[in-house]
Image (cartoon, rainbow, N blue to C red):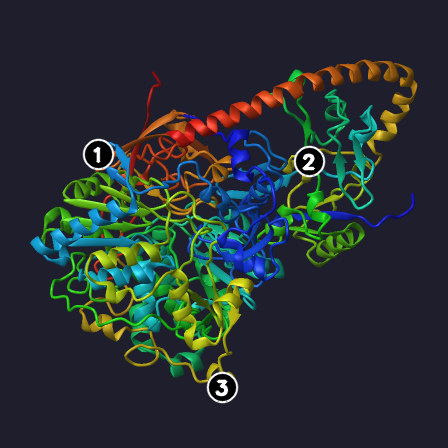
Amino acid sequence: MKPIKQYAYLFDTTRCIDCRACMIACTVENQVPMNDSYIWVAGKDVIGEYPNLKRATMPYHCMHCLEPSCASACIVGAWQKREDGPVVYDDTKCIGCRYCMNACPFDVPHFEWDKGIAGGALITKCQMCKQRLEVGQEPACVQTCPTGALTFGERQELIAEAHKRINTHPTRYINHVYGETENGGTSYLILSHVPFKELGLPEIAPTPVNAVSETVMSGTLPFAFTWGAVLTGVALLVRLRNRGKEIAAAEVIETEKSTEETK
Amino acid sequence: MTNTLSRRDFLKLSGAAALGGFIPPQAAHAAHKAGQINAKGEGYISTLCEMCVWRCGVLAKVKEGRVVKLEGNPEHAHARGNLCPRGQAGVMTTYDPDRVLTPLIRVGKRGEGKFRKASWEEALDLVAENMLSIKQKYGAEAMVFSSTHNLSQVQFENLLQAFGSPNYGTQRSLCFNAMIVSNLMTYGMEEPARDYSQVKYIILTGRNLAEAISNSETGDLIQAIDRGAKMIYLDPRHTKTAGKAAEWLAIRPGTDLAFHLALINVIVTEKLYNQNFVSQYTTGFDELANSVRAYTPEWAATLTEIPAETIRRIAHEFSAAGSYALAHNGWRTSNFVNSFQTERAITILNALVGNWGTMMLAGAGEESGALGKPPQPAYPRVAATRLDGVPWKYPFVPLKIGVFQQLRDSILSEEPYAAHGWFTSRQNPVLSLPDRQRTLQAFAKMDFVVTVDIIMNDTAWFSDVVLPEASYLERFDPLAMLGNRIFIRQPVIEPQGEARSALWIYKQLGQRLGISDFFQYKDEEDYLRQQLAPTRVSLEELRASGYADMSQTKKSEANKAPHWNTPSGKIEIKSALLAKAGYAALPAWEEPLAPRGGQFYLLTGKGARQTQFGTQNNKLLHKYEDEQRLWMNAKTAASLGLKDNDLVEVKSEVGKVYVKLEATQAIRPDCVYLMPGFGHISKGLTTAYGLGASDSDLHITYTDPVSGSQALSQTFVTVKKVERS
């Protein structure tokens, strides 16, 4: 594989205080609805029994795999691993089949269940604040982190930094950089003082899930084409219906607004 | 009641795109002129956060007259480009659907929540009329004023002093009077600054920096630990800070003093102190050596439940780190009447290792010495004594700090005289003072109550007039310095509705109260220009860049031999002032009250996403907030037949509340903990109303006679299960 310069996050549990500034920054930056979140707190928090206790949490979000399973599972090409790091999603292509959700070994993509397929529901997840990368800013979560638990930079440099921290403080960290090889490597790298499973991270082989799934998928190509065509048809119909709904919804909002103003 | 934010709210937050050419709103003119706002009306404007008192520099991203995102200002020493969760959620405080956007006048019974909208003219006239009538009938002292640490407080103080009332309440006696008075007695300053850049050993006595966040100081601590500094953390709870400590010591509440006395005992008897520093810069060491003789680690072990060998080892480690050891001198793990002596012991511990100049520095302060101010006449002489006992009962409590809970109690007892009016600005005493029933009784005694705030907080709910202030993203405030930098709080968007700045509100009142000579500025910008007059910095420059550098302090001054503003000019291990007033001049053990059978210590302490009593209505903070539940040790809970999420009744001598239980490993078996700030009773707060319970309903009022500090932990409670109907 030819080396490409790409961005990644490095997260260090020993610096995280679980303040959740990253999550609020993400919500505001990406206008994430109140019933959804691209980042969530993972991990056991308090570990052990009084008075022998530890704490460990992490902000869990898309791992931005180098060979993303979501992309290989997607039959309409809505997912793409960009050269600069983020795994991005094109909602105009998505047909709501949710194969990506099943494919992701990290359980990341969410579906807007409250809307349902007929409601034009889409998949949501962290996209590395691609709109900020374009103007030279770090993702909102990294930018705001008060303790430097989250850092952002070129992936190879961050891997080197992570190993440097482990080598400098061998008793402080588990001797592994999570994401360096998991699922073929990810752009979210994690250093931890507790076993990674205590943070809610799955144990994953270095071979990307894709390598397996793609073998299987190749045999099902004719089926996928047919099923894809059917789903595309459904999606088109849904979209046509939604256009009418969106207009109606906008009117409701306007009415509610003016009612409030006259209160 | 719903606590989720619908998409509709978010549409409001992000704002619908305006059609047609962009005309910058008034608020964005300076930024537009300076090229910080582009032709599409997008860009960043520099201002200051107000989600807590740390006051970080903020870059507000604006888009077509709306603020859409806040970033930490890299140029601001408290922010360094970062914001904490509260800072990030500031947009929702400004766009809170519950904002009060017109003046309101009460029409129903007080506390019933019935108000009508009024014009500023009518509301201000009514406030002035009532204040003047109280002054005429009972004297200016019958008007009580209270406000919390904020940038416009200087003008609030100006208003009350010009009006002629001595009665002023701040929240500090509910928080850190013990620390401030102890520092004043020992160092002659309210709060020395702390420098973590070279620290090797840190003792945090309940200073939960990971949850009670002071943005840059929290960052400093984590970086120090990252570099290899050893942190010892004392707290009956295993907080997020405990999770970062090399050692967590679950000390018994009320015994912080014993722990520190024992550390001093070891350091003194084993001669581990910095002898040069102690002999040159301190007074009273010999007396200290005598007075701590009995406070051995073995003695402290039975009180604190920390093994004697651990205390001895920590004393050795702390003194070995010498001038790179820091005992955080600002907090306590629990707050008892003996907390003042705890704070004294901590300040002395620092003096013994001689960490002045390395770990502890003369306070950074917010003195605006380089700035000017509008001219004004001398304040009228006030003959009346203060209701809060300062200084006649509490001689060491600074006038600007006061003893708030005593003020409330004097209103109730009408001793030494009765109060008749209460003016509150951006503060919520109904929720913050201990024993809420008494606070409500005090409010009920008032002839007139007026509140300035941005939302209908609980105190506004019990007011006769509510004056809507512009939010911190919508207004100018008086300028303040941080080190050698002047920073500006300026509007990044236009005020919503009829909301106005405090500078404007107080000037309008001044005119109606016949004290307009004390408000000699045309408008907010004129006030700031007069402040800037001696500096050669123009308001336009300041608005564009957000800050301006003043000349550096001369190097020679920084290298001068240290001097402390105490009677001896030295660090007073033995306090001459305390001795003179007949108080213990050296820290001595005072036995704290303790729970009786079946009772628990009730602990308090901040969480990372709330600031005191004013942020709980913010829906963004709420999105990622853990539900407020009563922490109880899991084993204790099991022994009482209680499970996670059981509804329990928590009862003290003065009140009871109902709240869900959290059975956790992270607390001592003899304690329970309730996060403060919840249990709002104003129905004008649609998110916060009815959420959780208030520990103010449980707290008994106990005041430390020296510092005036409220002993928040001297309340013990029983907990029992409530069967859900």
Residue A1 shows in this picture: yes
Residue tagged by mark 3? B556
Amino acid found under the numbered disc labelled 3: Ser
Tag 2 subunit: A
Res B577 quadrant in image? bottom left
Q: Position of residue B493 (x, y in %)?
A: 49, 50
Amino acid of disc 1: Val
Q: Which residue is mark 1?
A: B107
**Front-lying residue, A255 or B142:** A255
Which mark sits nearer the N-terminus, 3 or 1? 1
Q: Position of residue A220 (x, y in %)?
A: 89, 17
Q: What residue does disc 2 label?
A: A201
Question: Looking at the rendering, in which quadrant would you find the C terminus of chain A?
Answer: top left
Q: Is residue B344 above or below residue B595?
A: below
- Taking the image as shown, residue A157 lies to the left or right of residue B244, namely right
Quadrant for the N terminus of chain A, please.
top right
Disc 2 secondary structure class: loop
The percent coordinates of residue B190 (x first, y second) are: 35, 67
| Image label count | 3
> Along the line of sight, which residue is nearer the eye, B60 or B339?
B60
Residue lying furthest left: B137
For residue B517, which quarter of the picture? bottom left
Which of the two marks, 1 or 2, is nearer to us in this view?
1
Q: Chain of mark 1?
A: B
10 Å neighbourhood of mark 2: few (<14), some, or many (≥20)? some
For label 3, the SS is: helix
Please name the residue shown 57% across and 63% down the image.
B75
Q: Secondary structure at mark 1?
A: loop
Instruction: Determine the CA span between mark 3 and mark 1.
Output: 63 Å
Q: Residue at image x 42%, y 81%?
A: B562
* Real-space CA distance between mark 2 and mark 3, rounded to the nearest whole angstrom: 56 Å
